[in-house]
Image (cartoon, helix red, strand yellow):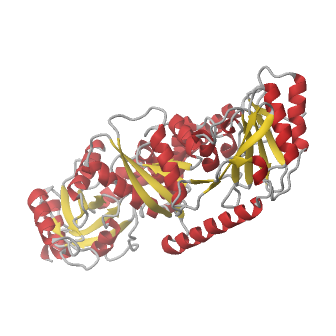
Amino acid sequence: MEKIYGKTEGLRKSDLKRLSNLYRRRLPPERVLTPELAQTLAGLSQEIHRPIALLLDRGGRVVRVGVGDAKDLPIPEGARAERRLSGFRLLHTHLSPGGLSRPDLSVLFLHRLDSLAALEVEGGQPTTLHLAFLSPPKAAEEDWRLLPPRPYFQYLDLDLRAEVEALEEELSRQARVRELLDGSGERAILVGVDTGEGPEAEAGLKELAELTRTAGGVPVKRVLVFRPGLDPRYLVGLGKLEELKSLAYHENASTLIFGLELSPAQAREIERVTGLKVLDRTQLILDIFALHAKTPEAQAQVELAQLRYLLPRLVGKGKEMSRLGGGIGTRGPGETKLEVDRRRLQERIAHLSRKLEEYARRREEARRQRRRQGVPLVAVVGYTNAGKTTLLQALARGGEAGEDKLFATLRPLTRRGFLPGVGEVLFTDTVGFIRKMPEELLTAFRATLEEVREADLLVHVLDASEEGALERHRVVRDLLLDLGVEAPVVLALNKADRAAPYDLYFLGERLGGVPVSALKGTGLRELKEALAGALLASGVRPQAWAQYT
């Protein structure tokens, strides 16, 4: 007997058998229903005193039978495949008048059904049919198009296949237009939450858009939600999620990206309610780090951070985790899949931790040799995308070219340079900082950030042209304090050529610093003099031959 879904408690075996027989039914692909099926569903619903729901594919075959409302019939995962619509339609009965309910229409919208039909039953006979289709995203209607309720036999000649094909063609046309305008990246709705931060929340949402673009996504809409407190289950509330789901449909977006870190339960609930891929800010940053990790050390650091983030979120990730390795012969008697996955993760975390300890020992040995040679070390630090790599290249006249991307540099890049009155120095680039840096990343990159603690001098590169430069300066300063960095700091007000004169003057008055343009080379002489003066003041002894330069 085929499986019957939904509210089957209390039904007799004979009722279940008759429901199971519905799997043998087949409708013409172009018809909403037939008189025979209408009579059968009405009679059976009246006898069991419950609504009946059928899920049919485009060939008219019944693929699922359920008892209850439309929402009680689970739709197969991945139903949409390559189509704009799911390829499924839902036909169910109503034992009382009233038309399609909001939950009914949510099922149509959430699962991108080809159509949704409700057949009213009165005295065991089929009466009125209610029929709904999705609306094209730019249509004047709501997210769905309701046809006028009519006696069911008046819809027997409706060409359902033509309706669906016309809708899919319109959906595809609008998607092609959007791809031409925005590119072919993954389209995402960005969601920030303001619980009283004001301008800082706006800045965080803007930064989330930069992160999304760096990860290869297309931020099509930014939504700032004002809430006095966070919803423990849905973060922004169930009503707001319904709005976001509708917005994603109209913007042809498949992803929701939240500016706060979601708990595992929140991520699962939001994904269940919206049917969209759900990411939080930490996952986005981890993805960017994985994209830019090129060296074995950087790749190990990023993988360690990702696994530490994933470990507490392992529940419900069985299918994804099955790709991590192991497999045949790895699970013991009675051991669950979840336990196996968790053990594999812990073993991999331990392996990566040992690997990174080895990298740290090698780095410490290199630092000892450098100290013996007496060459000062100048670390270039700053907020991500402030121009650190470009400035290092300008100061050292070598190294890799910078990129206008967040977190383009993940490994310490060290180059030799020269400072007047001091002599030869080493300039080293570092990982860019960001507000609310994920703890997993700080832990994984702590060995790399040791370069900052060992430096004789820091060059704090601040993007003077960026709105919110003061806040970014505070973020970097606080992170350096957390790392226990005590070296003197010289502030470089980078991108001075792009900054408004008043903003540059204001930052200089408030923070001090040397205005420079790493890209155009202006202000570099003054910056080198400031660096040399700071090194000499800290007790660094100049090399003998450099005293006469």
Q: How many marks?
A: 0
Query: For residue 523, what is the image quadrant?
Result: bottom left
Is 54 rendered above or below residue 449?
A: above
Considering every residue shown, the one lying at the far bottom of the view is 520
Q: Position of residue 202 (x, y in %)?
A: 30, 52
- Residue visible at 77% across and 33% down? 5
- Looking at the picture, tell me which residue is in the foreground, 249 or 494: 249
Query: For residue 39, what is the image quadrant?
Result: top right
Q: Report the side of 523 relative to 146 (left or right).
A: left
- Residue visible at 67% across and 58% down? 85
Q: Report the side of 311 relative to 31 (left or right).
A: left
- Residue visible at 11% across and 62% down? 506
Quadrant location of the C terminus in the rendered image: bottom left
Q: From where the camera sits, is residue 183 visible?
A: yes
Q: Position of residue 117 (x, y in %)?
A: 71, 47
- Looking at the picture, tell me which residue is in the foreground, 338 or 197: 197
Q: From where the camera sits, is residue 301 visible?
A: no
Q: Position of residue 98 (x, y in %)?
A: 62, 37
